[in-house]
Image: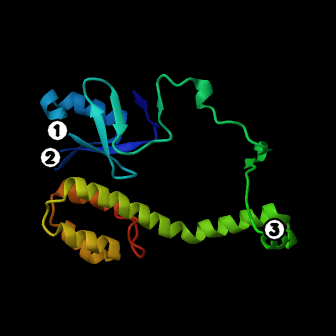
Amino acid sequence: MYIHSKDLTCTAFLDYKIIANGSLEHVMATARENFNRNDLVQLSIFDDSTGKMIDVDWREDIYEIQHQPDEASVTSSTSEAEQQPARRAGRPKLGVVSGEVTLLPRHWEWLKSRPGGASVTLRKLIDEARHATEQQDRIRQSQEATYRFMTAMAGDFPHYEEALRALYAGDSKRFYGVIDSWEPGISQYIKKLSASAFRTEGSIEN
């Protein structure tokens, strides 16, 4: 049995219609209350953050992210001691953890010459790099989630390949122009997943 973070939210489809959204526990409970066993096995459930399908065994409360190793997941047989990360050197009260960095002598000399020394300089450089790539990372993650869902649920829809090309080209007008002609539930969820996929576009409300 796999145990997933309670922060996981997902959306369930029956055919092309959204029948539930929220935590996985809520979605499963809603589905059980409203559908018989034959309908349950036809449901498709997707992780809202990744667009990946979630496999559910409706005979048990068992579920796992399909094709996605989940570092947050642990088996029920894993002991609490095994789940605890090993302590590392550093300044834990400040959230600082030490690690090994391999650099050439000229790199060390430059770092040591900077105000605050090597550690402060490295942290500043990393923060600057993270900030510089933050938007690009959001776009990439949104594109990947959208692609996964589209491949699973809309692969045989009209102009599917055109929509994919527009997605990766950053052409939001063409992309939304194509998917607006698709099944409403599918189009609605794609808009949710692709809300950060375009550099000049804001979030699109459901």
The residue at the point 14 percent across, 60 percent down is: 156
Residue type pointed to by label 3: Trp
Per the image, label 3 sits on a secondary structure element best described as: helix
Marks 1/3 in contact by CB < 8 Å: the verdict is no
Q: Earlier in the sequence, mark 1 or mark 2?
A: 2
Q: Quadrant of residue 111?
A: bottom right
Looking at the picture, how far across and down is residue 183, in whole percent? 15, 58
Residue type pointed to by label 1: Gln
The residue at the point 19 percent across, 66 percent down is: 160
Q: Quadrant of residue 121?
A: bottom right
The N terminus - image quarter: top left
Disc 2/disc 3 C-alpha distance (Å): 59 Å
- Tell me the tag on residue 56: none
Marks 1/2 in contact by CB < 8 Å: the verdict is yes
Instruction: Report the number of numbered marks.
Output: 3
Looking at the picture, how far across and down is residue 206, in whole percent? 30, 58
Query: Which mark is nearer the camera, 1 or 3?
Result: 3
Residue type pointed to by label 2: Asp
Q: Earlier in the sequence, mark 1 or mark 3?
A: 1
- Tell me the tag on residue 108: 3
The residue at the point 36 percent across, 36 percent down is: 64
State the residue in front, 151 or 190.
Answer: 151
Per the image, label 1 sits on a secondary structure element best described as: loop
Q: Quadrant of residue 129?
A: bottom right
State the residue in front, 105 or 190.
Answer: 105
Q: Is residue 205 left or right of residue 186?
A: right
Residue that carries the numbered disc 2 in the rendered image: 15
Residue that carries the numbered disc 1 in the rendered image: 42
State the residue in front, 96 or 34.
Answer: 96
Looking at the picture, how far across and down is residue 176, in whole percent? 25, 70
Q: Earlier in the sequence, mark 2 or mark 3?
A: 2
